[in-house]
Amino acid sequence: MGVIISLPIGIARTVVGALQKFVLRQNKPLRIDIPLPFIPIDVVLVTDAAQIMTLTNHPDVDHLHALPTDKLPFWSTWFFSGTRFHNKSHDKWFLAFEPQSEAAQYSERRKVFEDKLSSGFAGEDVKSLADQIASGASEEQVAVSLAQIVDARFMKSELNSIPVEVVRETRHVLPTNLVAALVPGNQKRGVQAQEATYSFCQKNAQPGLDVMDVTHNVGSVVTIMAVAVLKLKDNLDTPIEHLFTRKSNCPTPQVPRVVMRETNLNGLLRYPGRPSSTIVMLSISSAAEQANSLFFTFGTGTEWRACPFKDFFFNFMTALQAELKTRRQS
């Protein structure tokens, strides 16, 4: 009886909210509230840069792993287990999904990761990749090369390179795009890829590194960074800080938060969010384009908990763009 009553109410609220946002142009997040039996969906889509920044440290929302995985909405764990952010069999979450309350653990994991990235990259690596691009390398070939340049540093010394078959498998993880997960077979294939990559990193990552963080970085490099390199090739005259703040070029379209207590988020919601049930999706790609800020491309608009990969990405892309421009002029 409860579903019979709540389902039409939720649908009506969703329709009214859509009309207010897209027809009346009210600056409120779109809320999709469809309390289906067994799989209730309550998602708030925030696209405004200023609103995203107000939610960054909001006490009423937190990163997903603030709750045990089995307490999160089913659809959210179903989706993220096929991405580079969560490993289902070991119930491990990437660093950025850890709660605000675990600041010490977060800082420790982040520092270990940043220390590895601080060695940067060799000029010869940039030139070698530029050679590949000039010869018409495929996205997969670029991904294989990037895995060696970026991710080999996280592996034990006896591993000379990251095998091609690992790169190929990892490239099947889902993008951070809910629509992609709904394509038949995609989510299952994403889980398989995530599990295989985690297993590889568990066996080969250097001691002291968090396996999930290494798994995530391998996934990021061979998927979104490989795509980014090819976008760079076609936009040599566009500054990096402009190219990768365009919504269509942002590596991660949105990031989630979970509502921790009944709240209207300082008036952003028309009716209160539900603890442990309402997921707030922050469209950082939309915000990046609005603010023209890489802090949205790699976070929620501030230095606080910005992705540790941000500076490496910027420096590498800048060097690669300069190398490709030099070749174009010669």
Image (spheres, rainbow, N blue to C red):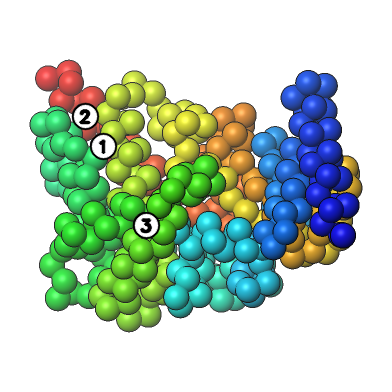
What's under tag 2, amino acid-wise? Leu
Q: What residue would you read off at disc 1?
A: 320
**Viewer-proximal residue among 300 and 26:** 26
> Percent position (x, y) of residue 301?
62, 44
Q: Residues within 10 Å of mark 3 (few under 14, many from 20)?
A: some
State how far apart marks 1 and 3 are (Cα).
32 Å
* Residue at the top extreme of this rendering: 329
> Percent position (x, y) of residue 146?
24, 50
* SS state under label 2: helix
Q: What residue would you read off at disc 3?
A: 189
The residue at the point 55 percent across, 37 percent down is: 285
Query: Do we see residue 77 in this rendering?
Result: yes
The residue at the point 31 percent across, 57 percent down is: 170
- Horizontal side of 6 relative to 300 (left or right) equals right
What's under tag 1, amino acid-wise? Leu
**Viewer-proximal residue among 91 and 123:** 91
Q: What residue would you read off at disc 2?
A: 324
> Measured along the vertical axis of the image, is residue 66 above or below residue 9?
below
**Quadrant where the C terminus is found in the figure:** top left
State how far apart marks 3 and 2 are (Cα).
35 Å
Mark 3 and mark 1 in contact (Cβ < 8 Å)? no
Q: How many marks?
A: 3
Mark 2 and mark 1 in contact (Cβ < 8 Å)? yes
- Horizontal side of 96 relative to 144 (left or right) equals right
State how far apart marks 1 and 2 are (Cα).
6 Å
The residue at the point 31 percent across, 73 percent down is: 199
The residue at the point 63 percent across, 73 percent down is: 70
